[in-house]
């Protein structure tokens, strides 16, 4: 089922404690098909098209990361879904981190999948985000996705998974992607992660060549009490490449949180 709240399109399935899914910079709500079907027996699973993606309106002006975090809060409150478990993939994880820092009262837990502290940690990271936004604007979404998509999966990925990743990326809108890239380039959460006071799971694909296993380990090490797990046989798009293992890790963690374990 698709619904709309605060100018944001949201896919919804199932019932139970709410779980909101935030996709990566080259994705959309449809990237979570396997989570919408695979976790709906235990949770009210919600997946947004981020502002500027899919059917969602672009945020006005030059939005910063706080604006995206506030959009998450508005969606949760608008759907009467707070407090919710919040799962973010890559860029979605950076937004989710900011929500945990800015409005922890709307969250039950935090899952960061193939994510990072932000691209603003290094000059190379900032330059890379700017270059990707320029490349998309100059070459168009289809050509950009054809070049970029293969980096998001493991070297021996199922061709059908790669096709799905490329197809999703080919639908990105340059304005939405450009805002997201700029926000990523402006963000470095390194010194703020110790302030997160929620149950946290950090997941990463074994062959993630975009943000990488080392960066996910760094996230887990800097967040007090965070759990860390590797999804075998998967790259950056771990939730799409190995949804069985990905969903099992998420399900186990959320069940512990809902059951009172920390």
Image (cartoon, grey):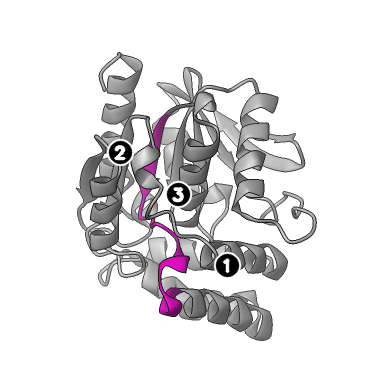
Q: Quadrant of residue 199?
A: top left
Residues packed near mark 3 inside 10 Å, few (<14), some (14 to 19) or many (20 plus)? many
Q: Report the residue marked by disc 2.
A: 201
Answer with mark 1 or mark 3, whichever residue precedes in sequence: 3
Relative vertical location of residue 110 with respect to residue 185 in this rendering, above or below: above
Name the residue that disc number 3 marks. Answer: 93
The secondary element bearing badge 1 is classed as: helix
Residue 97 placement, left or right of 221: right
Looking at the picture, how far across and down is residue 257, in whole percent?
32, 21
Above or below 211: residue 90: above
Q: Which residue is mark 1?
A: 181
Image quadrant of residue 131? bottom right
Q: Residue at x 26, y 28 (%)?
A: 252
Q: Residue at x 30, y 14 (%)?
A: 260
Point out the image quarter for the N terminus.
Answer: top right
Going from N to C along the chain, the mark reached first, 3 or 2, is 3
Residue 66 left/right relative to 207 = right
Q: Quadrant of the C terminus?
A: top left
Query: What's the magenta region?
Result: 109-125
Give residue 249's position: percent from left, percent from top.
26, 37
In three-dimensional space, the C-alpha distance between marks 2 and 1, rounded to whole angstroms, equals 25 Å
**Looking at this rendering, what residue extends furthest in the bottom direction?**
138
Q: Is residue 40 covered in magenta?
A: no
Q: Residue furthest top?
A: 259
- The image position of residue 188, as x and y in percent, is 45, 59
Residue 85, given in percent of the width and then of the height, sits at 45, 29
Distance, label 1 to label 3, CA atoms, is: 14 Å
Residue 129 seen in render: yes
Label 2 or label 1, whichever comes before in sequence order: 1
Instruction: Compute the Cα span from label 3 to label 2.
Output: 11 Å
The answer to whether residue 48 is above or below residue 13 is: below
- At x 24% / y 34%, what residue is drawn? 225
């Amino acid at each position: 089922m698709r619904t709309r709240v605060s100018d944001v399109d949201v896919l919804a399935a199932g019932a139970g404690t709410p779980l909101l899914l935030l996709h990566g910079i080259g994705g959309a709500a449809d990237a979570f098909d396997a989570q919408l079907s695979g976790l709906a027996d235990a949770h009210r699973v919600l997946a947004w098209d981020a502002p500027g993606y899919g059917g969602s309106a672009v945020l006005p002006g030059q939005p910063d990361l706080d604006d995206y975090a506030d959009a998450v809060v508005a969606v949760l409150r608008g759907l009467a879904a707070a407090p919710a478990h919040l799962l973010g993939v890559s860029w979605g994880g950076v937004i989710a981190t900011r929500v945990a820092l800015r409005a922890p009262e709307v969250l039950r837990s935090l899952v960061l999948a193939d994510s990072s502290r932000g691209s603003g940690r290094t000059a190379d990271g900032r330059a890379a985000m700017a270059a990707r936004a320029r490349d998309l604007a100059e070459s168009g979404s289809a050509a950009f996705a054809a070049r970029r998509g293969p980096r998001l999966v493991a070297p021996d990925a199922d061709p059908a998974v790669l096709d799905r990743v490329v197809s999703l990326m080919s639908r990105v809108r340059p304005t939405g992607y450009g805002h997201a890239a700029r926000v990523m380039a402006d963000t470095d959460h390194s010194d703020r992660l110790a302030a997160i006071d929620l149950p946290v799971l950090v997941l990463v694909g074994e062959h993630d060549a975009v943000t990488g296993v080392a960066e996910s380990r760094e996230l887990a090490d800097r967040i007090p009490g965070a759990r860390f797990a590797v999804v075998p046989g998967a790259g950056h798009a771990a939730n799409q490449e190995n949804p069985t293992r990905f969903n099992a890790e998420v399900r186990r963690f959320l069940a512990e949180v809902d059951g009172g374990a920390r």
